[in-house]
Image: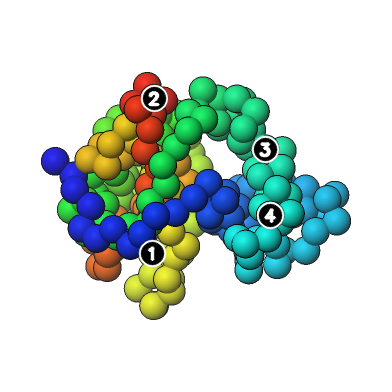
Amino acid sequence: MLTVVQVLGMSSEDEMVACFLSGELSSRRFGRSLRSHLAAAGQAEQLLTHPDLSDAGANFVRRALLAATRGYGENRALFENFPTHVTWTRALLSADEAASVRYLDYSYWVELSGGSRRPTDAALRIKAGLRAFDVPNEPFVDAARALIGGERFPPLILVGERQDNLVCLEGHLRLTAYAFVGFPIDVECLIGTAPAMGRWAQ
């Protein structure tokens, strides 16, 4: 059973939203769209890179950005059927615990992991030169090299009905990079739990 090594403290919806957007800002896949929405809203990247969670107005703008880009709070896209009331916690996971986190049930991640949705299986397949839908694996290798070089990644965002059965909501590439190099350090994360999450994060 997965148990959290160290709970760092309570988190919040505002911190989760800020963390999610910060992670996607550097994403090759999602960063461009997010920057376009930032510009359209007349906002600078500092809103995401240096979030002030005590600023209610800034929190509102970030929630609106996550709604526009990923459907948060609008029951669509990534957040379709996502629970409304979620308890957020900041925590560290050990190597074994992080290795037990599953990918979202999304075709690319299912394929990359050979059907298991486990990051360790995906890492083995990447090392064997296997691709999912012929998408290049270089971003995983680059992230793994950065981790070995001492870079520290933003927290992963994980969700589940309980803390002993977690699915990655945001940070799949970073989770895979950790697995690629054997989870050399504890993994910082935000964990969202809710009774209804079990139906969403299966």
Q: Are marks 2 and 1 in contact (CB under 8 Å)?
A: no
On-image quarter of the C terminus:
top left
Residue on which disc 3 sits:
67
Which residue is located at x 85 percent, y 56 percent?
Answer: 42
Q: Are marks 3 and 2 in contact (CB under 8 Å)?
A: no
Residue 158 placed where, x, y %?
A: 39, 45
Q: Are marks 4 and 1 in contact (CB under 8 Å)?
A: no
Q: CA distance from mark 4 to mark 2?
A: 27 Å
Give amino acid for label 4: Ala
Q: CA distance from mark 2 to mark 1?
A: 34 Å
2 or 1: tag closer to the N-terminus? 1
Residue on which disc 1 sits:
144
In the image, is residue 78 above or below residue 90?
A: above
Task: Report the side of 35 relative to 109 (left or right).
Answer: right
Query: Residue 56, labelled with which disc?
Result: 4
Secondary structure at badge 2 equals loop
Q: Is residue 64 visible?
A: yes
4 or 2: tag closer to the N-terminus? 4
Give amino acid for label 2: Ala
Q: CA distance from mark 3 to mark 1?
A: 30 Å
Secondary structure at badge 1 equals helix
Mark 4 or 2, closer to the camera: 4
Which residue is located at x 53 percent, y 46 percent?
Answer: 13
Query: Residue 196, labelled with which disc?
Result: 2
Give amino acid for label 3: Ala
Give amino acid for label 1: Ala
Q: Nearer the viewer, residue 43 or 181?
A: 43
The mark tally for this picture is 4
In the image, is residue 192 above or below residue 77?
A: below
4 or 3: tag closer to the N-terminus? 4
Q: For label 1, count other residues whose C-alpha is less than 10 Å away and answer few (under 14), some (14-19) or many (20+).
A: many
